[in-house]
Amino acid sequence: MTGVAENVQADRRSIIGRGTPLLPEEPKTLAELFLHAVRKPRADALNYKKDGEWTPISSEKMKKRIGNIALGLYSLGFRKGDKAAILAANSPEWTLADAGCQFAGVLDVPIYTTLAPNSVRYIIKDSEAKVIFLQDNAAFERVAEAVADCGSIQKLVFFDLAGVNAKNAISLDELETAGERLKSLNQGLLADLIEAVDPGDIATLIYTSGTTGEPKGVMLTHSNIISNVIDAGEKFIFSTADVPLSVLPLSHIFERSAMYLYILNGMAVHYAESVEKVPENLLEVRPTIFVAVPRIFEKVYARANLKAAQAGGMKEKFFDWAIEVAKTYSLQNEHRAPVSFSLAVRHAIADKLVYGKLRDFFGGRLRSCICGGAALPDDIYLIFTGAGISIKQGYGLTETSPVITSNNSLDVKLGTVGKPIRNVYVRTADDGEIEVSGPGVMLGYYKKDAATREAFTKDGWFRTGDIGNLDNDGFLSITDRKKELFKTSGGKYIAPSPIEQMIRSSRFVSQAVLVGNGRKFAAALIVPNFEQLESYAKIKSLNLSTPREFCKSPRIINLLKRQIEAATRELSGYEKVKKIVLLENEFTVGGGELTPTLKIKRRVLDDKYKDVIDMIYNSADSE
């Protein structure tokens, strides 16, 4: 980074300096973090499923393998400042490869396994990665053509080499063996490599999802990440007795930072086998800590709601009653109001018959859920908290390493994303945009000086692109994404996210996307909850069964319209949804409509459903 970007950073350093420095005994680089962790040795530091059994890796073995990976990279000619891409699903090997890079001073570049080959090509070329870690042959074949087009790649390292027929390919085992061999020849080299890494060095390049433009490589230093890991966890209580289950992709800084937190605190980390296996893994692992996005909790509730609806009669009514009790109970606690004897009795009954089953889904001993990545609906928070599943919502960005604010056991408020974590400062601009300074704020965007300058104010605060406000108690609320605001042809600005959240409160709605930029009114693309509709059709004796039949049925369309009208009745007239279209297919990461963290890619949807959107407004013009 040169020129104006350096000036921006120079201006920022005086602000960052206001923060409390890390304690002398705390790690200052990611290599030190892993070394610090093995001071609390355990036999099951990392755990994965193999042949139907959970298999542990001890902290001592973890340390040894990390060192061998670092030395293996060195033996192949890779040096401090080189880049290594990681394209693999969550696994101990992902963490070991990441840590090996950090020991060697090699910048790693995580790549989502769901990214299209063109996006993989762009990231590798832009980052100039020289080596790429890959899961297996299936992962390689999907992107082989893109990788072959990247002249910087010198070596492919496979976690599983079976079936691979590629030039310059080796297994992770072979890389570790090479490192072991080098260690026997030069006992002090690993320590020298670790010593050469400075807290201000770039540790990783994480590419943004590109929802609003070309992906940019976010440069995060060791100091950025370490400070955030320590400061974000300051008001939480962790111990070596905690058992986390890793579910979200490690390619995202949210899960990766959580992983560092687990390892630093000596926990027994378990890796979910896959997204599909998460319910099964939750029951097996019975985690005490779970990091998730709101969509997971929405789906768990929707499943429980569907089961009650299918049972019908008194069971459905009792479930609905229990949910209302949970929300009332949670609100009383939220406002620190005394819980009446009547409410306590009702809650105890509901807890025995309903809430316990919700807790059992997560394994039955969950004590803390940390939620981020998107807005958590208030109702979902109240339901789960009232059911004894404590959800702590936070807020952050890749560019801030990631945590900016967080609710916690000491400070929590409904409808907010919490207070700024230690050493992080938050303010809002005149237009409501949230601005941040602190030790976790990125160094800048890789090879993009203009974009870096645009991302910072003249006095060095990072512009988040989110709109929000700080209340008198210091809690932050997010109202929308600045670039997602759209204006109707009548000149009215609409924030889509809160309205979409309202619409999704209907049990008949799975996904909702607001459209209407430059149009006369707001409309919505709706993906129904077809399981709920099937239950409804059965009760109402409707001869409907396929998604297409439901989406075309005037009766169902009318039902969804009424549901949306009820959910959005408090909105101003110009914000209300005037037209809807029901879609048969869910928005997915694989389909390109969602980012890997399940955020809507509005530009993609606008293009993909252009004909459908045009039809909405053309039919309105003809009425």
Image: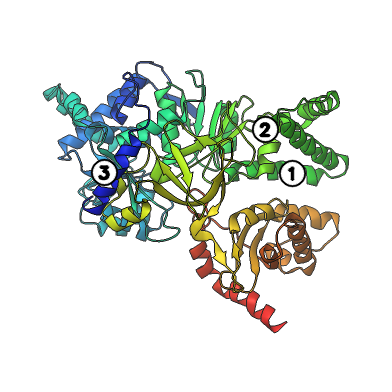
Q: Are marks 2 and 1 in contact (CB under 8 Å)?
A: no
Residue 403 locus on image (x, y percent): 45, 38
Q: Residue at x 50, y 57 (%)?
A: 482
Q: Mark 2 or 1 closer to N-term?
A: 1
Q: How is the image coloured?
A: rainbow
Residue 527 locus on image (x, y percent): 65, 59
Q: Which residue is mark 3?
A: 10
Using the image, determine if residue 10 lies above or below residue 364: below
Using the image, determine if residue 156 lies above or below residue 527: above
Q: Which residue is mark 1?
A: 305
Residue sitting at the far left: 185
Q: Which residue is mark 2?
A: 385
User: Taking the image as drawn, is residue 97 in sight?
Assistant: no
Looking at the rendered image, the quarter that the C terminus falls into is: bottom right
Image-based side of 421 in relation to 616, left or right? left
* Pick the front one: 257 or 23: 23
* Pick the front one: 217 or 316: 217
Comparing labels 3 and 1, the label whose residue is closer to the camera: 3
Determine whether the residue tagged by mark 3 lies in a helix, strand or loop.
helix
User: Taking the image as drawn, is residue 360 in sight?
Assistant: yes
* Pick the front one: 459 or 251: 459
